[in-house]
Image (spheres, rainbow, N blue to C red):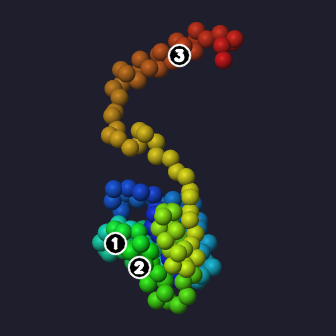
Amino acid sequence: MILFNLSVLARPAETLVLRQPDPDGRRLWKALFEQTTGRICLVINEPYDRGSIEHWCKVEGFKPSFYEILDEPVITLRAEKIHRISSTFGRPEWYIDNDPRLCAETLKLGIPTLVVACPYIVRPEWDGERVVKEWSQLVDSMDAQALKSAERTWGDI
């Protein structure tokens, strides 16, 4: 059984509904799902309710064998819970996460661990409130750009 953390599968957001699947996490999930014939457990760090988790998995096209919520705040306790979950199904195969501290703890417990480091960029304008510019501001900005473009000489680079 492979234990796959939701943080690898979906990018962070305030609620589960807003979490978008990460393309690299999706590719990794599909490859492992095919290799293990679907024997993947989804491990979730946040305390989402079970109905929301099942709905999100259905909508996004993921079908874990089962899912477990890690409700312990301490990393060593999380690692021990992961060890208990994985040993329930025999020898622990893999634990996949993007938290290096938790991965170090699972390695100490003898679980083969894969640390996933996929960069993604949250653009600053996506993080805050969107302010809609007025039409006059857009027109003024376009006029200023056109003027700068017309005044530029071929020697300016």
SS label for mark 1 = loop
Residue contact between numbered discs 1 and 2, judged by CB atoms under 8 Å: yes
* Labels 1 and 2: the sequence-earlier one: 1
* Labels 1 and 3: the sequence-earlier one: 1
Residue contact between numbered discs 1 and 3, judged by CB atoms under 8 Å: no
The crowd level at tag 1 (other Cα within 10 Å; few <14, some 14-19, many 20+) is: some
| Residue named by callout 2 | 81
Please state which of the two labelled residues, at mark 1 or mark 3, is closer to the viewer. Answer: 1
Q: Residue at x 50, y 47 (%)?
A: 121
> Residue 140, relative to residue 67: is it above or below?
above
- Residue 80 in picture, x, y percent from top left: 43, 78
User: Amino acid under label 3?
Assistant: Ala
> Residue 116, relative to residue 121: is it above or below?
below
In terms of image quadrants, where is residue 118?
Answer: bottom right
| Residue named by callout 3 | 146
Residue 105 is at least partly visible in this image: yes
